[in-house]
Every structure is written in structure tokens, then in C-alpha cells.
């Protein structure tokens, strides 16, 4: 039975639109899908849009295919929601032991695991409909990502590197955008994907510092616990590797000056995160984590500008 109380989730922004405007019966499901926290689907979306824009430039297109951008947006929202719902079903006992997550819909009793499972299926169907709009290669590639998504909730039980598994899943769009244009994978897309994987490890390490004490008590692993006081140099190294891999992806795709200007701005923003980080300030960690959406805009706009610049005589 769905509880219709108005209990807010502790790790969601105060006064978000779900808490303020969603009908009571919808709120638990909106919270399961993290509709109250759009940063997640933005971070899932960026590799898709980067890859689509990089492929557009490589193919000589004036602009990334708008229809593809819309499909990736809908797919990112649906599949991020499905992934979060699945994660909450698997982690419901762990979430009940962590202060930041015990108010989530399943451990707090707002929905049952069975109701969450039905909602998961509904979101997955939306994601499937999105995939069916692409070519066969892209459709199959998208289905393959589900293997990584399924493994993610269990990674923290066996390794201190669950962020790496998250990166493999969250960065899959780096392959998808290119495949949607060319119907195959090439080196630029693979390099972009690998760079996005390392980028994800970096930003999710920052995020994980909010929970490191609870994670240690519960007995689950994270790179935040692994790096500890060495997080700043570790993060710097991760972001350097990100820059090398993504830069190589742009270079092998034949990207122009505008793309590299956006890429340089992206790298500067990552550097700012390293300098600004204070792992003992959870609110700052969350703010820096969220700033990665801005970093995504910088690179994407540079890639789009490069497409437009190629059309000039």
C-alpha cells in the first residue's frame, strides 16, 4: 500500500518540485526515479550528447541530429530512473542503515519492493521504445549496457571501486551517439567513452565522500574510502587521464579549434573541482559534484560550435 504522507527524502534538495507540486500518490515513485534530482540524468545524458555532437562533426553535419538529442534526453531520464529504482530495490536493507538514505521510499515504507519492481518495468519499457528508434547496431549496443547496469549495485559489496562500474554504465552514451550516426563503433567513440568512465569515477568519488563514514560502518566499499586523505591527488590524476583520453578522442575524430576550446574550458572546470574540494564538507562535495553538469555544457557547446564552424567558407 502506498503511503500518501508528505515525508521528504533526506538526500533530496529542499523544496524541490516533486515535494512541492507532485500528487501524493506520485511522490514516492518520482523519488524512486530521482525526478527530484535532475543532476543524475544530466550526467547520464552528457556522454550521449558529446558522442552525438562529435559524430556530427566527423560526418560533416551542420548540427547534431535534433531527433537523436531528444531521444537521448528521454532515454536518459527513463533509464536513470530505472537504474535508481533497481538500485533501491537491491540496496533497501543497506539504505535503511544509512542516515542519508533511510528516508528513501522503500526503506521508509512509502512503497513496497514489489510496487517498485512494477515501476522499474514501466521505465524500462520507455527506454526500450527509445532504443527501437535507432539503427539495429545501436539498439543492440544499448541492450548490452544492461549487463553493466545490473552489476552495479553489487559492486560495492565486493570492491572499493564501485565508481568504476558506475562509470562503465553511466558513460555508455559515449558509444551510443557515435553508433546512432555511423552504425558502428570507431576509435574516437571508444576513447570518448573511456574518458567519460574515468570522469565518472572522479565525480562520484566526490559524491561518495558524503557517505564515507556510514559506508565504513555498514561495510561497503567506495573510492572515497579507498583514497581517503589522498583524494585530492587521486582526483587530479583521474581528471588528467580523463583529459588525455577525451582529447585523443577529439583528435582522432578530426575535431576543430572550436571543439578544443570547449574541451579546454571543460578541463579548467575539472581543475577547479580539484582545487576547491574539501572532503570534510559534505555540502561542498555535493555542490562540486553537481557542477559537473556545467562542465558537460562546456564540452557540448564546443562540439556544436565546431559543427557550425565547419560550414563556414
Image: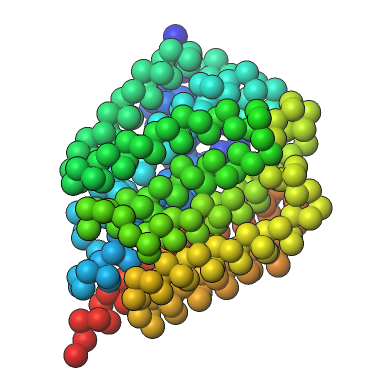
Q: Position of residue 214 (x, y in %)?
A: 74, 32
Residue depicted at 64% across the width and 41% down the height: 161
Where is residue 242, by image quadrant?
bottom right
As drawn, 68 above or below 262: above
In the orientation shown, which residue stands out farthest toward the top?
Answer: 1
> Is residue 199 found left or right of 115 in the rendered image?
right
Residue depicted at 51% across the width and 52% down the height: 197
Quarter holding the C terminus? Answer: bottom left
Specify how the rendered protein is coloured.
Answer: rainbow
Q: How many marks?
A: 0
Residue toward you, 165 or 118: 165
In the orientation shown, which residue stands out farthest toward the bottom?
Answer: 313
Q: Position of residue 145 (x, y in %)?
A: 39, 38
Q: Is residue 254 visible?
A: yes
Residue toward you, 73 or 62: 62
> Is residue 42 found left or right of 241 in the rendered image?
left
Where is residue 90, by image quadrant?
top right
As drawn, 248 above or below 96: below
> Is residue 237 found left or right of 189 in the rendered image?
right
Residue depicted at 41% across the width and 18% down the height: 117
Residue depicted at 74% across the width and 26% down the height: 218
Q: Position of residue 165 (x, y in %)?
A: 54, 41
Q: Is residue 38 visible?
A: no
Quarter holding the N terminus? Answer: top left
As drawn, 243 above or below 68: below
Q: Position of residue 239 (x, y in %)?
A: 60, 63
As drawn, 289 above or below 312: above
Amino acid at each position: 500500500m502506498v503511503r500518501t504522507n508528505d515525508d521528504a527524502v533526506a538526500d533530496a534538495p529542499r523544496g524541490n518540485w516533486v515535494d512541492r507540486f507532485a500528487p501524493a500518490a506520485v511522490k514516492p515513485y518520482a523519488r524512486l526515479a530521482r525526478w527530484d534530482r535532475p543532476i543524475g540524468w544530466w550526467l547520464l545524458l552528457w556522454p550521449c550528447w558529446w558522442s552525438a555532437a562529435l559524430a556530427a562533426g566527423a560526418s560533416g553535419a551542420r548540427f547534431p541530429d535534433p531527433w537523436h538529442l531528444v531521444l537521448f534526453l528521454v532515454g536518459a531520464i527513463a533509464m536513470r530512473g530505472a537504474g535508481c529504482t533497481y538500485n533501491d530495490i537491491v540496496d533497501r536493507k543497506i539504505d535503511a542503515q544509512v542516515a542519508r538514505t533511510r528516508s528513501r521510499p522503500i526503506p521508509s515504507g512509502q512503497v513496497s519492493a514489489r510496487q517498485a519492481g512494477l515501476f522499474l518495468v514501466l521505465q524500462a519499457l520507455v527506454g526500450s521504445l527509445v532504443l527501437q528508434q535507432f539503427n539495429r547496431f545501436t539498439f543492440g549496443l544499448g541492450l548490452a549496457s544492461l549487463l553493466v547496469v545490473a552489476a552495479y549495485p553489487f559492486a560495492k559489496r565486493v570492491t572499493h571501486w564501485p565508481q568504476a562500474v558506475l562509470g562503465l554504465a553511466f558513460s555508455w552514451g559515449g558509444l551510443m551517439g557515435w553508433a546512432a550516426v555511423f552504425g558502428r563503433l570507431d576509435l574516437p567513440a571508444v576513447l570518448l567513452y573511456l574518458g567519460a568512465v574515468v570522469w565518472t569515477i572522479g565525480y562520484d568519488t566526490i559524491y561518495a565522500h558524503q557517505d564515507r563514514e556510514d559506508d565504513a560502518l555498514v561495510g561497503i566499499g567506495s573510492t572515497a574510502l579507498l583514497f581517503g586523505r589522498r583524494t585530492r591527488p587521486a582526483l587530479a590524476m583521474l581528471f588528467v587521464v580523463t583529459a588525455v583520453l577525451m582529447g585523443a578522442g577529439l583528435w582522432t575524430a578530426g575535431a576543430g579549434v572550436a571543439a578544443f576550446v570547449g574541451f579546454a574550458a571543460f578541463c579548467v572546470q575539472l581543475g577547479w573541482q580539484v582545487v576547491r574540494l574539501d572532503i570534510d564538507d559534505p555540502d561542498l562535495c555535493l555542490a562540486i559534484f553537481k557542477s559537473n553538469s556545467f562542465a558537460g555544457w562546456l564540452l557540448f557547446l564546443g562540439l556544436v560550435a565546431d559543427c557550425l564552424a565547419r560550414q563556414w567558407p
